Amino acid sequence: MSSTGREQHHETDQFRRALNRTGIAALLSQLDRDHHLVATEAPFRPLHPNLSWGRVLLTKESSSLALQLLDRNDEGDAELAARILTALLAVQDVRPGSPTFGLWPWHAGDDPGVMDPPDWNWADFIGSMLARIVHDHLTLLPPAVVEGARTALSNAARCVLSRPVNLAYTNIAAMGAWVTLAAHELSGHDLPGEPRERLRLFHEEVTRTQTFAEFNTPNYWFVTLEAMTLIKQCTTDTTAHAMADDVIDVLWRHWLARWHSGLRQVGGPVSRTYDSDLINNRPTCVALQLASDCRLQLYDVDDLPAVGRLGEQAYVDYRATPEVIDELCGPPLPGTVVETFTPDGVVHAERTGLPAVGTTWRDTHVIIGSLNQCDTFNERRPLLGWFDSSGWFDSLGWFESGDPTHAGRVEARLFREGEPFAAGNLSTVQAEGRVLWLLSLASPAGNRHVKRDIIDAGEPVDLAALTWQLSWSWVAPDRFRLDGQRLTGPTTITPGSRLTVHTDRVSGGLDLLAATVEGSDVTCHVVPHETGVDLRCDLLPESPGRRMPIMDLGTVGIAGSLWLTGGLDPSPARPTTASAADRLTVSWPDARLPLQLTGRTRIGSRAEHAAGLG
């Protein structure tokens, strides 16, 4: 079994063993015993139409199972791990001169180049598993498998080194730094370049900016923390250890700035996430629990999700300082954080020249944050708030099998024909718990993805339905009032109307201030449902078969306010609107913190929207 190298509480040791046990069980249940690789039923992926689908053999998950079996080392584990590794190494691209040399495909049997572009990250992720196996478990494996693993690690590092990675690609820049350093030290093969060069560049960027271009992302924050932790755990380079410590320090300060210990959530804005709710970002929860030596308990040792990925983390030596642990577990610290993340817009999107500036406000029972301007890519959360939803929060708690109803949530999304749509352009301004927001559309822009699925200017796209949605979740619908009246079902809402919500500890609401497309009013409804209430604005009347360029919509201006505050504070004054020459201005009078937001309503490029922000 791997050792983390530090004395740990008995409870933490139990948690590590449970992670390992649960991860192995989940992956073993999927193991194809004929091919010795983890198998699953994969869907057709429109963004990767040439990728195999149906029953497929998974490379990354197979490397994870091999590592976890060796970590456990029960009877027969090492032998099975050796068979898995032999099968895994056989599908690495080792063709001399191949543009994907050193890379694995997602699915064994596919060529890595079948994806356009290839997923270069598989060299980092599988390379990381191999580095840990070579560091921790050489004595458990036959010599031929050991040499094969070392060679495959060297090949993976060559693949990483051949790829120019922008330092703004935070998690992969960090993973590449760890894998290349480990390969230099552990593979036994000569590699080009200075071993810690990638780490040096990443360290310089983080030291210079004191933030991350992939800001406040639970998924990538944990990957970066893991990479830096493994550098310290699995290499002997003390200079690299010091660099990793510097990055870890910034990671924790970045996390804590938007962490709410009472709600156990991170407030917006979020640059990338696969799920708004932290409890569903499972590897991050595991990292936090281990780093706190189980003082912060996000999962019960007897009720872990059956997710194979989690077992990889069982013996990663995450360490938080006592001061960090106290802040993770202590009462939330009230205040506002305003941070410039990048000088020219969010990562993986069109550069606009507009700095990406986030504002987050935290109070005892609330955390809410926004980004000054952003696309509406499915993985972004440019406007996200969490609040104590009183009765639900108290009765269900955190440990109800990962049920996300421990806190109320409010977030904004754009949908095309029921699917998330990246072509929105959301502008915001925030003071404490009050936010003004304005939605328009951009062209050219992303469709399902901001890089891999672009709708060119003038390109027709299916627009049978287009809906802007601001959703309140995990709070009882009977807590809401529309212009003072209870909601009895879906209700039309028009500009000038106000939706309010009161729980035992929190007050909040929104104003709809404008809703037009090319000068015509948009139909909006407030829709109560089982777990909350949505504001839904249909930018276009539903029309199956409609296909047109986004630019043909002309102007789009959906604007409103949003607020959250602790206690039963009275509703704030109502904002006002003014429009002129394809621009909309919304203002919120307040004696202490007045707000004003001006944005472009004419559909245009991201840069044009950035230039129109005021």
Image (spheres, rainbow, N blue to C red):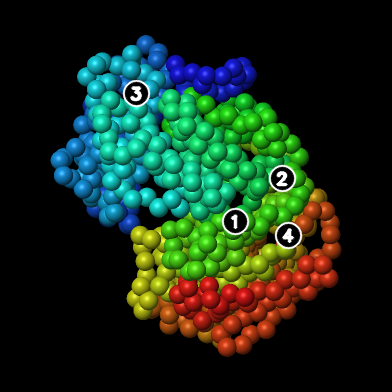
What residue is shown at x 22% (from left), y 19% (from top)? 144
Position of residue 15 measured from the top left corner of the image (x, y, whole percent): 56, 23
Q: Of callouts 4 and 2, which one flags the residue occurring earlier in the amino acid sequence?
A: 2
Q: Which residue is mark 2?
A: 392
Q: Which of label 4 and label 2 is nearer to you?
A: 4
Label 4 to label 3: alpha-carbon separation:
50 Å
Q: Of callouts 4 and 3, which one flags the residue occurring earlier in the amino acid sequence?
A: 3
**In this rendering, is residue 182 above or below 349?**
above
Instruction: Say whether residue 490 is left or right of residue 348.
Output: right
**Answer yes or no: do the residues labelled 2 and 1 have beta carbons within 8 Å?**
no
Q: Of callouts 1 and 3, which one flags the residue occurring earlier in the amino acid sequence?
A: 3
Q: Which residue is mark 1?
A: 269
Instruction: Say whether residue 114 is left or right of residue 263.
Output: left
Callout 3 crowding tier (Cα within 10 Å): few <14, some 14–19, many ≥20: many
* Circle 1: residue type: Pro
Label 1 to label 3: alpha-carbon separation:
39 Å
Residue most extreme to the top = 75
Identify the image quadrant of residue 583.
bottom right
Label 4 to label 1: alpha-carbon separation:
13 Å
Q: Which of label 1 and label 3 is nearer to you?
A: 3
Q: Secondary structure at mark 1?
A: loop
Label 2 to label 1: alpha-carbon separation:
25 Å
Callout 2 crowding tier (Cα within 10 Å): few <14, some 14–19, many ≥20: some
Instruction: Say whether residue 141 is left or right of residue 370.
Output: left
Q: Which residue is mark 4?
A: 433
Q: Which residue is mark 3?
A: 134
